[in-house]
Image (cartoon, grey):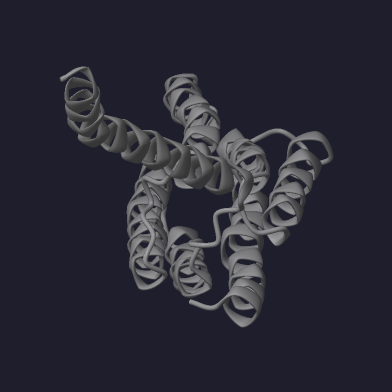
Amino acid sequence: MEETHTTDSRSTATPATSVALNERAEQNLQFIRELMESSSSFTGVSGTGYMLAGASALLATWIAMQQATASSWLLVWMAELLVAGTLAIGFTIRKTHQQGESLWSTTGKKVLFAFLPPMSVGAVLTVFMYRLNAVETLPGIWLCIYGTAVMTAGAYSVSVLPLMGGLFLGLGTVLLLLNPIGPEMLGVGNFWLGAGMGGLHLIFGYTIWKNYGG
């Protein structure tokens, strides 16, 4: 009778033990996936999106040159921010889906959370400089802020992004420190915005498209 009781107890415990082992195996696999994901780079950045954003920036540069007031000039570039941002984000989401990944993956979130804080500072400075009637300083500030955002986000993405960010930061620094301050600075700044937001996006967008696809 004792042997029968022992055998029954063991057979009863076996399913519970199997479930526990399966759960533990799933937890281990999930941990391994998260570890691999966190150590990988985000390759979903779209070269096509960057090239289209660059093309729209060149068009915005030309349109902004025709504006008679600083306020209308600023309005043109705010519209360009919306257009370029929509293109870059839209094509990046499309590329990540094609890769079977998500923008909200661990590495994708790291890129976003590294990119957004500097851009938020840029938004605050834009409003502040507009209130000071110092719109002519905005091109240099934008280039520096955007360059910083791309450098920090690029640390979690493809290797060319930190270089691109550094070039944006360099352009903005030269514009702010080596050009005379005054209303005429807006025209110079508009040219450098075209060179950066247009030219650099086209060059690096093509580089990303060629080497990383999309």
Between 37 and 21, the residue placed more toward the observer is 21
Q: Looking at the rendering, which quadrant does residue 159 occupy?
A: bottom right
Give the residue displayed 42% in from the left and 65% down from the top.
Answer: 63
Query: Along the horizontal axis of the image, is 149 left or right of 56?
Result: right
Give the residue displayed 41% in from the left and 56% down from the top.
Answer: 67
Residue 180 in the image: x percent, y percent?
A: 77, 37
Q: Looking at the rendering, which quadrant does residue 194 occupy?
A: bottom right
Q: Is residue 19 above or below residue 131?
A: below
Residue 204 in the image: x percent, y percent?
A: 65, 69
- The outermost residue toward the front is 1
Residue 135 in the image: x percent, y percent?
A: 52, 34
Between 27 and 2, the residue placed more toward the observer is 2
Q: Is residue 46 above or below residue 18?
A: below
* Residue 184 appears in the picture as rendered: no
Residue 22 in the image: x percent, y percent?
A: 33, 40
Between 28 and 178, the residue placed more toward the observer is 28
- The outermost residue toward the right is 178
Give the residue displayed 39% in from the left and 56% down from the top.
Answer: 80
* Residue 37 appears in the picture as rendered: yes
Q: Is residue 66 above or below residue 184?
A: below
Where, quadrant-wise, is the N terminus in this rendering?
top left
The number of discs equals 0
Give the residue displayed 79% in from the left and 41% down from the top.
Answer: 179
